[in-house]
Image: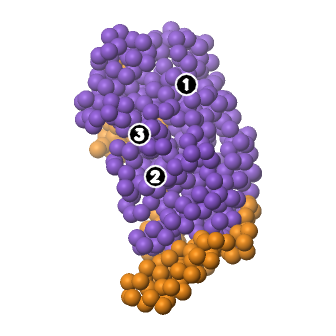
Amino acid sequence: MTIDELARQPGEWLRTAGPMSDIVVSSRIRLARNLAGFPFLSRADEQQRQDVQQAVRQAIERAGLGEHAYYFEIDRADALHRQILVERHLISKQHAEAEGCRGVAVDRREQFAVMVNEEDHLRMQVLRSGLQFDAEWEQISRLDDRVGTQADYAFHSRYGFLTACPTNCGTGLRVSVMLHLPALKLTGQIEKVFRAARELRLAVRGLHGEGTEAYGDFYQVSNQITLGKTETELIKEFKDLVIPKIVEYERRAREALVASRPVELDDKIWRAYGTLSNARTINSEEALFWLSQLRMGVALGRIDRMAIDTVNDMFLMIQPAHLQNLVGQPLDPEQRGVARADYVRQRLGGNGASG
Amino acid sequence: MKCQSCQKEKATIHLTDFAGGQKQEMHLCEKCAAAQGTLVKVQAPPLAELLSNFVSAQAGAQELAKLKCSQCGMTFAEFRAGGLLGCPNDYEAFAAGLAPLIERTHDGGSQHAGKTPAGPPANGAAGRVARLARLRRDLSAAVETEDYERAAALRDEIRVLEQT
């Protein structure tokens, strides 16, 4: 499998609509691990980075990542391919932009991704559509056990799995969800939710994680505490307490919009549809803005011409690297605007589809 | 950039809207954005800031800064500046400075309660993969210095380890 092939298929986590997918776009569990006997990456020279990569690759191969697993050497990939992996949430922005020997192992269905030599030697993730933490924990824990019998993890009786940043030590566990919260934004309540989230020691970030903007009303919410509780306790708290509450707030805000401002709401949704199915050039920011309204319209059943996974898929495909891969050539921002408008019109069966 | 609302504080919140088909941008400080209920981007204070505020408040901060790991050579002062540790041994080497910091960032948590590593490999050789990597590295060093006797011994050792 090549990155080009990967880029043409819809992400597994988008293909099927998982539980609560009207609001929870995707959920993810990540484990941070380091090998004993090696320095962390801030102190590793290129030779040590290579040794770590070789050791981890071998451990993953022996552990078996899944059907048709593939390893991408990020330092040898070009900028476009690196960006495709970021857009698909298979690697972090930091991993794409870093230097030195590093990579990512991905299985064909893109449920698993193991970043090698990011901030830690290994960062394994399972990503799925909707809220599916139980299945994800089972998958990632099993992978962790299999890799752990092949590689010697840095482990401390008090601080658990040792990580380059002490804020991740212990379980090394990060659970996160990508939430679509357009109604909370429209009704001006989003700040209240974030304040509550902060009080619960959670982090709220933009579309592509740390240091990125919350485009398209997508917010990534994740735990910050990793030490002192078991993995299942941390996951349970997050999925049973935190997320249902935010989902409930968003649902109530949507219901309130339907009840008190239906015309304004439909106007927004149908303007979104109108703009997207007629635009001749559109930048990412504006496309994400309208797609967000459209997604809410579909989720609320105010517009029934498309399924929610079609809208999800558009969110993925209109990003710069996917768009260029689709067209098959590098495009400057102006050309991307045209290609993006063409693509979106086609998907919506809009006017003058061939552009 | 100054906040558009109060014209005093630094604008840290940047909003974009397409209301009425027109793109509108707003640049606000945190206070005004919160007052208007439009604060959309929230981030925890950066770790480095947390670290420097916290560590400098600790008694004997200067003594702590001098702590040095014998394995990777990092000092506690360097960790404070960069926010990332140099090797697993730093958790021991910097224990005096790290323990209170870890407890604070984990809301009082100071003892690992989660899973433990799956255990040594089935063949009983803990750290097999790491050892293999080290042996391979020694091998290429031996070849480079034309120490063929040592290279041959290393190659045999690697073969045995690879087959287990």
Q: Would residue B138 be seen by someone viewing this image from the given angle?
A: yes
Q: Quadrant of residue A230?
A: bottom right
Q: Nearer the viewer, mark 1 or mark 2?
A: 2
Q: As rendered, which of B42 and A216 lies closer to the eye? A: A216
Number of labels in the image equals 3
Asked if both marks, 1 and 2, belong to the same chain, the answer given is: yes
At mark 3, the secondary structure is: helix
Q: Residue A309 got which mark?
A: 1
- Judging from the image, mark 1 belongs to the subunit labelled A
What shade has chain A been given?
purple
Report the Cα–Cα distance between label 3 and label 2: 12 Å
Assign the C terminus of chain A to one quadrant of the image.
top left
Q: Front-most of A175 and A330?
A: A330
Query: Crowdedness of circle 2 by 10 Å Cα count: few (<14), some, many (20+)?
Result: many
Q: Chain of mark 3?
A: A
Q: Where is residue B140, by image quadrant? A: bottom left
Q: Position of residue B64 (x, y in %)?
A: 52, 81
Q: CA distance from mark 1 to mark 3?
A: 21 Å
> Marks 1 and 2, how far apart in space?
27 Å
Q: Which chain is orange?
A: B
Q: Please state which of the two labelled residues, at mark 1 or mark 3, is closer to the viewer.
A: 3
The residue that appears at 62% across and 47% down in the rendered structure is: A66
Residue A342: percent from left, percent from top: 33, 20
Q: Are marks 1 and 2 in contact (CB under 8 Å)?
A: no
Q: Local crowd at mark 1 within 10 Å, few (<14), some, or many (≥20)?
A: some
Mark 1 or 3, nearer chain start:
3
Q: Which secondary structure, mark 2?
A: strand
Task: Give the residue pinned by disc 3.
Answer: A4
Q: Which residue is mark 2?
A: A72
Amino acid type, mark 2: Phe
The residue shown at (59%, 14%) is A301
